[in-house]
Amino acid sequence: MKGERLALRIDDIGAASKRYEVYARRDLALGPVRVSGNFLFLKYLPPFKAWGPYREMRPQEWKQVFRLLEAHGAVITVSVTAAWVNRDGSLTPFPRKFPAEAAVLREGVESGLVEIANHGLTHCVLKGHAFRPAWRHSNRKAHREFWEHVPLTVQEEHIRRSQEILQETFGVEVITFVPPGNVFTEGTLSIAARYGLKVLSCATPPRSHPELAIVGNERVLAFHDREIVLEGVGWLEARLETHRGRRFCFVRDLAEGAGLP
């Protein structure tokens, strides 16, 4: 409704899941025979392809987004995955992998248009190279970082390192946590709070919590960089027009009513 607050949130910035998360949206029917759309190369082809691969957003696209935000009196929360996962499982910090993109996002932060949120260190499970595309099945589940089966010691290292990288890169306190794929545990939340994260935003019901303000997605327009890469900045412009009259804010601002722990 007009006048109500709405937070824009774009996810997956810097995440290698855009390269490795490859799965099919449908199977291949050959008469009475059905072949899995995830078999071999099928998942890379339309109409089977459901997600990756696609490229990172370019600096010029970010500048277009910033101009669009200014024209609509809007701001945006940018969920950054702090390190790129290389095929061998090694990690490259976001500002080293994408220096030009990091620089333009810093400009957005300094101009008051951008809030940086923590979207994990890897966005995926590294153990056993589970993040790599599989020959015969989807690897989508491997592109969620904070499953129950991931030891809390590993989760803590990921949250610690991601906070360190993001806060050093952008020179600001990062307090909003967007767990990749909406997956987290109570242990994840306790660790996140210990490293300065105070607000949780993802597809989960808003609720009170002793350690973080869980705002969910009810007043959040959440999308991925994939929409802009594949459909252009006009995709975002159309959404802003749809929500004209709303009071745009950062995700962290939604926690004000709930009260930060």
Image (tube, helix red, strand yellow):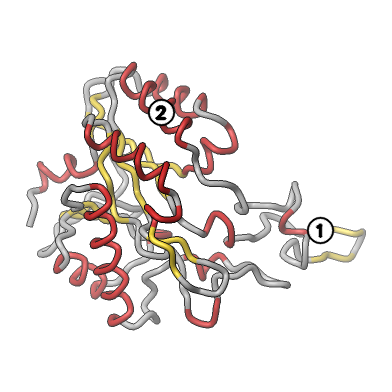
Quadrant, the C terminus: bottom left
Residue 133, relative to residue 237: is it above or below? below
Q: Amino acid at mark 2?
A: Lys
Of the two numbered discs 2 and 1 in the rendering, the one whose residue sits closer to the viewer: 2
Rendered image: mark on residue 146: none
Query: Vertical placement of 69 versus 151: above or below?
Result: above
Q: State the image coordinates of residue 102 (x, y, percent, origin top left).
A: 36, 45
Q: Tell me the residue that label 2 is attached to.
A: 63
**Residue lying furthest right:** 31
Neighbours of disc 1 within 10 Å: few (<14), some (14-19), many (20+): some
Mark 2 or mark 1: whose residue is earlier in sequence: 1
Residues at discs 2 and 1 in contact (Cβ within 8 Å): no
The x, y position of residue 189, in whole percent, is 22, 67
Compared to residue 228, the image places residue 175 above or below, namely below
**Tag 2's secondary structure?**
helix
Which amino acid, mark 1? Leu
Tell which of 93 and 219 is nearer to you: 93
Q: How many marks?
A: 2
Q: Is residue 134 left or right of residue 121?
A: right
Quarter where residue 200 is shown: bottom left
Considering the numbered disc 1 on the image, is that residue within a helix, a strand or a loop? strand
Return the x and y of residue 241 as percentages of the image width and height: 41, 19
Q: CA distance from mark 2 to mark 1?
A: 41 Å
| Near-viewer residue (107 or 240) | 107
Residue 231 appears left or right of 125: right
Q: Quadrant of the N terminus?
A: top left
Q: Residue at x 83, y 64 (%)?
A: 34
Which residue corresponds to the image point at 72% horizontal and 58% vertical from the top-left? 43
- Residue annotated with mark 1: 28
Which residue sits at x=50%, y=28%?
A: 233
